[in-house]
Each structure stands twice: as structure tokens, then as C-alpha cells.
Image (spheres, rainbow, N blue to C red):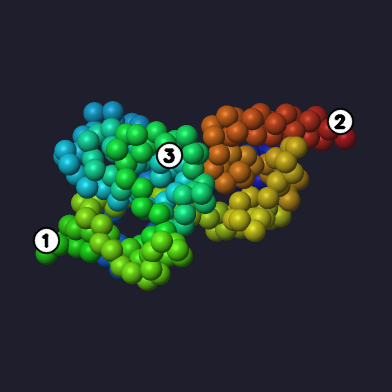
Amino acid sequence: LLQEVDAVFLGVGLGGDNRLRVPGEEGPGVVGATALIERLKHDPTLRIPLATRVAVVGGGNTALDAARELAKLGALVTLVYRRGREQMKGYEHELRHALTEGVRLLTDAAPLEILRRRDGQVGALRVAATGNPAATDGVETDISADLIVVAIGQARLAEFVSRFPGVELDGQGRIAVDPATGRTGHPRVYAGGDCVNGGKEVVNAVAEGRDAARAILRHLRESSVG
């Protein structure tokens, strides 16, 4: 690609949803949160059976978005997070809205296994208590569920960025850039959006794209003059 163009902007997001990597995950009834939200966005007529029991695993804004959307569709939603409420990365006001809308919050609970019924469908999510003084570490609980939504982040970009010499990832798996220009370690490759900021708001991605576009134009002008 770099042999065909003068500059490249990478706005590739964070990749697909990460997996829980627990027994029982393979099979129907387990979906990634971003994939689910994308489907809901493009198919407003999508419906789920009333009283469907859903366990959403995660504590970020994506998990909260998925939980709220499913609750609005009539699902009985439990939001499962492995740490305490104060450590959740999602916005507090979004969490308050979710709780008002009927989402149940279960903190300090780590997924251990997805239990399936004889017909292969999801029946429950087994979790273990983790680090909460009010709970006993390791005590297992089964959360009844017909659907498991996984919202624990998205796949990292190492394989993709390896195609661009000089482009590197930071310690959190994001593309490392100059924050003022969006330029990576390669002088002709720029990046912005979730692949750089780790998954913020649309307004952040727009601002980063704008700043990078301006930097690219300056680079091209300077190159043409030189």
C-alpha cells in the first residue's frame, strides 16, 4: 500500500470482540457485544423473546450499551463484572440509567464456565466470587441465562500493524502515535480513533481524524516543496 500512495491513515478500530476462553463458550448463544450492537443498529426491527435471560460480561461502556439495549427489548439482563463497581470503566451515569431500566449488577464475579442444556443451548453462566470482602473468594454461583454477551474488549492489532514497518503498539495494545499529529513511527503512516485511544467517544475519533488529516496535508506540502 505504501508503494501506491503518499500517506496512509489507519482508522481500523480495535478488531473483533475478545473471547472469555472458558469451557462451554463454543456454540450457539454466545455473542460479542460489538457485533450484537452493530446488528441492533442496522436492524431496528430485531426482537428477542420476552423474558429472555441475558448475562452481559464486562464493565465498560460497550457492556452498558449492550445491557441497556437488551433490557429495552424486554430481556432480563444481569451485568457481570469481575471487579467492584468503583473500578468499572463505563460512565457512572450510564450505569445508573441501566439500573433504572432494570439491569441487575453483579460485581466481583469472574466467569468460570458456560453451562449448556442437553439440546446444546446456553443454560447458565457459572461465576466465582473474587476479592469482595462481603463475599467468599472462590464461591461459585450459576446465573441463569439463555444468551451470553461478551464485552471484555476487542482483539489487539499486532498482526495488522506488522504490515507497516515502524508502526508499533504501546503497552496497552494501541497504535502508538504523536498525540498532536497522529503520526506513527512510520513518517507516512498516521492513525486515530479506537485503535489509538482504546475506545472512546465518536467525537474523539472525529477530532483525531481531523488532526491527522491536517498533519498529512502539511507533510505532503513539505514533501512537494522539498
* Mark toward the start of the polypeptide (2 vs 1): 1
Given residues 117 and 78, the one toward you in this image is: 78
Residue name at image x 23 percent, y 40 percent? 75
Residue name at image x 38 percent, y 64 percent? 135
Residues at marks 2 and 3, CA–CA distance in whole angstroms: 53 Å
Number of residue marks: 3
The percent coordinates of residue 31 (x first, y second) are: 31, 50
Residue at the outermost front position: 134
Dot in front, 1 or 3:
3
Residues at marks 2 and 1, CA–CA distance in whole angstroms: 69 Å
Residues at marks 1 and 3, CA–CA distance in whole angstroms: 34 Å
Question: Mark 2 belongs to which amino acid?
Answer: Val
Q: Quickly name the residue at label 2.
A: 225
Residue name at image x 25 percent, y 62 percent? 142
Q: Is residue 95 left or right of residue 40?
A: right
Residue at the outermost right position: 226
Residue 81: numbered disc: none
Question: Mark 3 belongs to which amino acid?
Answer: Leu
Residue name at image x 47 percent, y 46 percent? 60
Q: Quickly name the residue at label 3.
A: 95
The percent coordinates of residue 1 (x first, y second) are: 61, 45
Residue 119: numbered disc: 1
Q: Is residue 72 left or right of residue 176?
A: left
* Mark toward the start of the polypeptide (1 vs 3): 3
Reply above or below: 70 against 78. above
Question: Mark 1 belongs to which amino acid?
Answer: Asp
Asked if the residue at tag 3 contacts the one at tag 1, i.e. Cβ–Cβ closer than 8 Å, the answer is no
The percent coordinates of residue 41 (x first, y second) are: 35, 32
The percent coordinates of residue 157 (x first, y second) are: 55, 54
